[in-house]
């Protein structure tokens, strides 16, 4: 397995961009928001994975304010729900929805017990509800859980039981069936490498014992679920920037031997008629 740099073209996002969200919608990758060393953004970039082309399309409607460390949740492979995030000292708890067919933003009104302003949280969608866990409000890290029922846009706090994780932000979460899997993150003082699972049917937390050699504690990493394996890449612990890849086999709750080198084949456009690395 071997890393290779993809040859792309078009209106490429800034190299310094960070704390943005990334969603796969069909064959396209939607990148929204984020920041560089000076500013936060509310721009939308779309990457066509077939043609390897970046675009910066015009969007319409009630566009969210510039933000970073927000969440973006894909529903029905069509609608992107952006929640929270921040811009400098300002934190948000508004919901915005992007229709990916029309590229139109709306700011739907919600009712109920809305979460406090936050960023660096994670979300998932299950049974037509968006679940929000953790993050930080600018004063402290959080470990609460909320859900937004998309049928009536009503917020409610989920009273979870079991081994509730230590408050954290900049963790990752992935959904497999009804299991919401949280890995790592930081509370601003310590970085974690633990694995927690929230059952969205019983609303009970469980801390999983994991075998094998675990990654160093970290936040700001990325994770991707593929069949029963959770791939984790990179991250930061306050002093070290990581570029390693770990694979957690969820069926055995064990880390596979660390991957240090792997290969990705990227398909050219049909006009080119060949694969390249």
Image: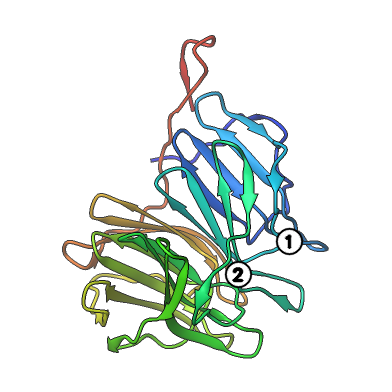
* Residue drawn 72% across the image and 34% down it: 11
Q: Is residue 177 above or below residue 45?
A: below
Along the line of sight, the residue nearer the viewer: 41 or 78: 78
Mark 1 and mark 2: span between their CA atoms?
10 Å
Outermost residue to the right? 38
Along the line of sight, the residue nearer the viewer: 21 or 7: 21
* Mark 1 in CB contact with mark 2 (< 8 angstroms): no
Q: Is residue 104 above or below residue 81?
A: above
* Residue drawn 54% across the image and 9% down it: 271
Q: Earlier in the sequence, mark 1 or mark 2?
A: 1
User: Which quadrant does the N terminus fall into?
Assistant: top left
* Residue drawn 60% across the image and 77% down it: 118
Q: Residues within 10 Å of mark 2 (few under 14, many from 20)?
A: many
Which numbered circle lies on residue 202?
A: none
Q: How many marks?
A: 2
* Disc 2, SS: loop
Q: Determine which residue is flagged by label 2.
A: 84
Outermost residue to the left? 252
19 on left or right of 15: left
255 on left or right of 266: left
* Disc 1, SS: loop
Instruction: Tell me where residue 216 appears, x and y as whole percent.
Output: 44, 74
Q: Residues within 10 Å of mark 1 (few under 14, many from 20)?
A: some
Instruction: Tell me where residue 243 appears, x and y as whole percent.
Output: 52, 58
36 on left or right of 240: right
Q: Determine which residue is flagged by label 1.
A: 65
């Amino acid at each position: 397995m071997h890393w290779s740099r993809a040859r792309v073209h078009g209106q490429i996002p800034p190299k310094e961009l960070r704390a943005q969200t990334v969603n796969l919608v069909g064959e396209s990758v939607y990148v929204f928001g984020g920041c560089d060393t000076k500013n936060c953004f509310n721009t939308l970039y779309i990457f066509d994975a077939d043609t390897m082309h970046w675009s910066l399309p015009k969007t319409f409607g009630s566009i969210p304010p510039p933000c970073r460390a927000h969440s973006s949740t894909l529903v029905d492979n069509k609608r992107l729900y952006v929640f929270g995030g921040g811009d400098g000292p300002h934190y948000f708890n508004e919901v915005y929805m992007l229709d990916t067919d029309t590229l139109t933003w709306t700011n739907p009104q919600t009712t109920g017990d809305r979460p406090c302003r936050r960023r660096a949280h994670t979300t998932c969608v299950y049974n037509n509800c968006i679940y929000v866990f953790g993050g930080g409000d600018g004063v402290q890290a959080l470990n609460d859980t909320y859900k937004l029922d998309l049928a009536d846009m009503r917020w409610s706090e989920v009273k979870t039981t079991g081994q509730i994780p230590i408050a954290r932000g900049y963790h990752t979460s992935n959904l497999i069936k009804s299991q919401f899997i949280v890995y790592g993150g930081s509370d601003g003082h310590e970085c974690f490498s633990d694995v927690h699972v929230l059952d969205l049917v019983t609303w009970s937390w469980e801390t999983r014992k994991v075998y094998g050699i675990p990654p160093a504690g970290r936040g700001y990493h990325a994770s991707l679920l593929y069949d029963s394996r959770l791939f984790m890449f990179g991250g930061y612990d306050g002093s070290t920037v990581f570029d390693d890849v770990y694979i957690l086999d969820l069926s055995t709750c064990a880390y596979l031997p660390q991957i240090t080198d792997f290969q990705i084949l990227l398909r050219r456009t049909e006009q080119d008629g060949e694969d390249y690395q």
